Amino acid sequence: MSPDFKKKPAILGGVPAFRALLPITRPTLPLPAPLLSKVKKSLKSGMITNGHYVCQFEEKIKKYLKVKHVVAVNNCTSGLMMVLKVLNIKGKVLVPSFTFCATGHAIVWAGLEPVFLECDPHTLTLDPGHIRKRLGPDVGAVLAVHMFGNPANVDELQSLVRKRKTRLIFDSAHAFGSRFRQAYVGTFGDAEVFSLSPTKLLTAGEGGIIATNQDALAEKLRWARNYGNPGNYDCVFEGLSARMSEFNAALGLEALPSLEKNVKNRNVLAKHYQDCLQGTPGIGFQKVSRENRSTYKDFCILVDEKEFGLTRDCLHGALDAENIQCRQYFNPPLHQLNVYKNRYETVPLGLPVTEWASQHVLSLPLYSHMTRTEVEKICRVIKRIHYWCYKIHDIKRDRQ
Ligand SMILES: *Cc1c(COP(=O)(O)O)cnc(C)c1O
């Protein structure tokens, strides 16, 4: 027995592993000086919107992703709304229930009806088997998600929609820097939409990026972010006011050169988490195919209470007591959110895998500049909590 295990977990009255809160994530930000010089230039020019930083940012991203068009917008949610609107989709939109609320909100704001589909229990991305079963003349689009940066089953999704007139869109909020085989996420389907909010790898403060290889779609998206104005103020559809500001683009430009390094760091740290937790009973991991690269926007574990000795919720509470901030992404899943429950079709009925995932997945702290020592410490704490689990059961029973 490692002497470390003798120490009591904080939930049983021991000293918390971290004196100050270790947050689930922290943005990795560029140095202030070059950013401030860009901001100064922008102020001096008087062009604080529709200036050249947004154009420059779009060009750089186009080169990085190797995609034909990049349209910078104010966030990912409005980006998804505009793509759904501009593609003029008729019919329902197939979407995973296991995702962030914004994926569903974008569909409803675009005036469309979601159908919530099952995810795969290992990859946590949309299960193509259920898409195959549900696709039909009443379906206008599939909106897939690269969950936690793990690329969706792109090949199978593309071949499924190709045979029909169904559109394929990706909520790529987590996946700036992910690769499906050799190609960067951002080059697939009709369009992919990234988020640049501070919890994502590449941040511009706030912001979104739409990537597409389609000329006509890109042009309309440029109108869409500018009220639907094609240039002569004679609006051709009801667009949004959804431009990216020059300040946000300047931050994005400064952050972009570190992205590759950050993705690599996260892959090293995720591997380290897995190595350190290997052999801990009841702890599983999201499956990322060897051919692909995940950004690990989040690193999650799957907790099997029978083997681990505690439920996911119980482990979450015990880690909270240690000042280790975790998140139950995504609990509740979309079809159980107050706003959506009992209102939309689910395929299959009740979504058993999604409900299982939302009860068993726990995201642990991970950020691009986190240290290996922090990862090791968290893993030791998880093992210690497992060692003491029978006692933790007792205090639960006493409290009831
Ligand atoms: C963060 C996130 C969004 C929303 O991104 P914003 O840029 O904040 O609009 C959408 N979908 C998923 C899966 C996300 O995690």
Image: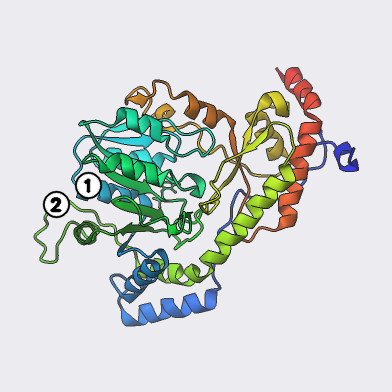
Secondary element type, mark 1: helix
Q: Distance between the residues labelled 2 and 1?
A: 9 Å
Write the residue at 72% across / 53% down: 374
Quarter of the image where the C terminus is located: top right
Q: In which quarter of the image is residue 312?
A: top right
Where residue 268 sits in the image (x, y, percent)?
A: 64, 57
- Label 2 is placed on what type of residue? Phe
Q: Is residue 3 visible?
A: yes
Seen in the picture, residue 71 relative to 189 is either above or below; the reply is below
Residue 18 seen in the figure: no
Q: Which residue is drawn at 72% across and 56% down?
A: 372
* Front label number (2 vs 1): 1
Tell me the quarter of the image containing the N terminus.
top right
Give residue 237's mark: 2
Task: Answer few, some or many: residues within 10 Å of disc 2's Cα (few below 14, many 20 plus, some between 14 and 19).
Answer: some
Tell me whether the residue at label 2 lies in contact with that at label 1, contact meaning CB atoms closer than 8 angstroms.
yes
Residue carrying label 1: 85
Q: Is residue 394 left or right of residue 125?
A: right
What residue appears at the point 49 percent right and 55 percent down from the top-left corner? 200
Q: Is residue 8 above or below residue 196?
A: above
